[in-house]
Image (spheres, rainbow, N blue to C red):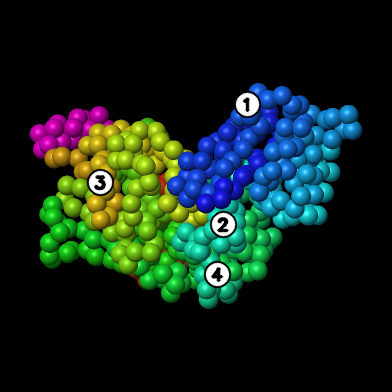
Amino acid sequence: MAEIRVFISSVQAEFVDERQRLCNYIRQDALLGRFFIPFIFEELPAINTSAQEAYLAEAGQCDIYLGLYGEHYGYEDEEGISPTEREYDVATQQHKHRLIYLKNVAARHPKEERFIHKVEQDVVRKSFSGYEELRTAVYTSLVRYLEEKEYLRLLPFDATFHRTATLSDIDPAKVELFVSLAHDRRNFPIPFSAGIPKILTHLNLMAEDGRLTNSALLLFAKDPQKFFLTSEVKCAQFYGTKVEKPIPFYQVFRGSIFELVDQAVGFVMGHIDARVGDRSKSTSVNVDYEFPVKAVTEAIVNAVAHRDYTSNASVQVMLFRDRLEILNPGTLPYGMTIPQLSQLHSSVPTNPVLAHPIYLAGYIERMGTGTTDIIEQCEAMGLPTPTFMQDSFFQVTLYRKQQDNKRDQKVLEESKAAKPAAPFELNTRQRLVCVYCRLPRTSRQILNHIGVSYHSTNIKKYINDLVDVKLLRVVNGGSRNSKDVMYVKC
């Protein structure tokens, strides 16, 4: 098999971290490593030639020129031209395949601005804010290169273009909500006013000819299950410790990736114990759930983001008397083992094109730390250490706290003696509201989600009462009586 040489070009000092990490990623990735040989100048051994001759020779011998441009123009030769621009010119003159990535920076050197303007006359470039975004964009570009050159006959599921979907299948409201979240949480640079095609293209979810990837549909389609029936999430609660009938609570959730996560997390948090603290020491109160909300969310996000979408099975969330099990039809990335999940490890998402927008929307706090965060959060609450298992499904298990009646009675007596006002319990629907309002919601959306009629009595009970105890807050101003006012969890 012919080797495809990738020449990584940039101002070395400005991109020292990105260059090395990107080079290592291409070599180690199970797919990319089979085809691509990355080159960075700092790995060149000592040779009997000048640096300028060496890097220009490599640029001329490569198959793909990969340029990283940012704030600085770099060292200038006698003619005032930087090595990066020289490398680009050689790649252009010899008709190399060029991939250009611009780092989002506050300001650029005037010569760098001029250089970028020249490049933009020749090729379409992608922008990025950090390494994770850069890696996803490079991954997508290299895989598409393999497809175009027919090294690969089939793209990975998340990067594959759907045969029939069109832009009319995309829900503008879902894209607008994503842009708002991604801007607030990850400084996403493109406003909704720029248009859905530009946003989707920037996220590697849409080709220049208008074709949509499977990821675009899973994230933003009006009806994702129209295209991928088994992308739903099945949730069930059992009174005992094993799967057996009768099943007291069973729901199948449908919708976008973000909606699936919100609904599944809401199901779990709505069927476990929760206590609301009093306001003896503060004007605000916290909800203490039996499981940490972040751990449950992380586990469910991982299940829907990293599952095998070519499988006919669905993600399953099962709550037992002693544990919570979250299963997805998928496997660990090649080379990763179960013990590694309990340690800091590299992020190797099964569906990187799909995972990146989920990260941008704030559903994943940090790339590559999900499983360790789940463990730390559960242990911090005094819960048993979560476990991971790979069989026909990948399974995450969070354990409920073991009952200790004598200890609980002692804690309760001490609590009563120390606090002048007793805490109160949230009912199931109020818990669902708290979880559902991780994102801004209108009163009509909230009441519809928990299955009650849009009535002033229900608005008071399930919204205004939670605002009064500072579990919810208004996010877009206006009166509580306005139908357009939105609420979010404090």
Give the residue at mark 2: 146
Q: Residue at x 45, y 69 (%)?
A: 224
Label 3 Cα crowd, 10 Å radius (few <14 / some 14-19 / many 20+)? some
Q: Is residue 274 something that shows in the picture?
A: no
Q: Nearer the viewer, mark 4 or mark 1?
A: 1
Q: Residue at x 69, y 60 (%)?
A: 194
Q: Position of residue 102 (x, y in %)?
A: 69, 45
Q: CA distance from mark 1 to mark 2?
A: 29 Å
Mark 1–mark 3 contact, CB under 8 Å?
no
> Tag 1: residue type?
Pro
Q: Mark 4 or mark 3, which is nearer the start of the sequence?
A: 4
Give the residue at mark 4: 170
Magenta region: 404-422
Q: CA distance from mark 4 to mark 1?
A: 51 Å
Q: Please give the label number shown on residue 45.
A: 1
Q: CA distance from mark 2 to mark 3?
A: 34 Å
